[in-house]
Image (cartoon, rainbow, N blue to C red):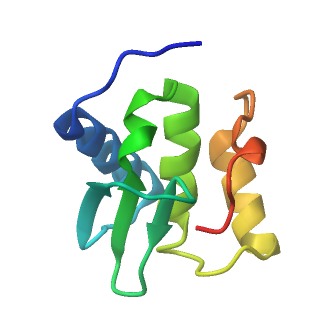
Amino acid sequence: MSFSKLSIDTFKLEVQVWAERIGVSPSEIHVREMARKWGSCSTTGRVTFSRDLLEQSEATRTEVIIHELLHLKVPNHGPLFRGLERAYIAGRTSTYGALSTEG
């Protein structure tokens, strides 16, 4: 399945909208080439996303955005993190399980 490529500015707007919904404030939002994962979150609040994510479906982008932004609240993948992730993604068909979850 092929999706049209989203602009970086539009993608960053999606991230900002989700940050407001979740109640977090990333210090920086970056989009760059990443070889092994869709995104990452630093301890300083910087979230970085793979440029390849711009060519994925809205559902996939949303799940990755939620995952990385939730790390601003919970730094690990423990039960609290997974519960919050499920709550924000509720009602969606999850595509994230097939993606790297090391972010």
Residue extending furthest bottom?
43
| Front position in the image: 76 or 49 | 49
Instruction: Give the quadrant of residue 80.
Output: bottom right
Instruction: Give the quadrant of residue 89.
Output: top right
Question: Percent x, y for residue 81?
Answer: 70, 69
Q: Quadrant of the C terminus?
A: bottom right
Q: Residue at x 66, y 68 (%)?
A: 102
Residue extending furthest left?
9
Task: Tell whether 52 sits left or right of 86.
Answer: left
Residue extending furthest front?
35
Question: Percent x, y for residue 82?
Answer: 76, 62
| Front position in the image: 102 or 84 | 102
Count how many numbered circles sit on residues in the image. 0
Q: Is residue 16 above or below residue 42?
A: above
Task: Tell whether 10 sits left or right of 88.
Answer: left
Q: Quadrant of the N terminus?
A: top right
Task: Tell whether 10 sits left or right of 56.
Answer: left
Task: Tell whether 25 sits left or right of 55.
Answer: left
Q: Residue at x 23, y 68 (%)?
A: 28
Q: Residue at x 35, y 45 (%)?
A: 51
Question: Percent x, y for residue 50?
Answer: 41, 51
Q: Is residue 32 above or below residue 78?
A: above
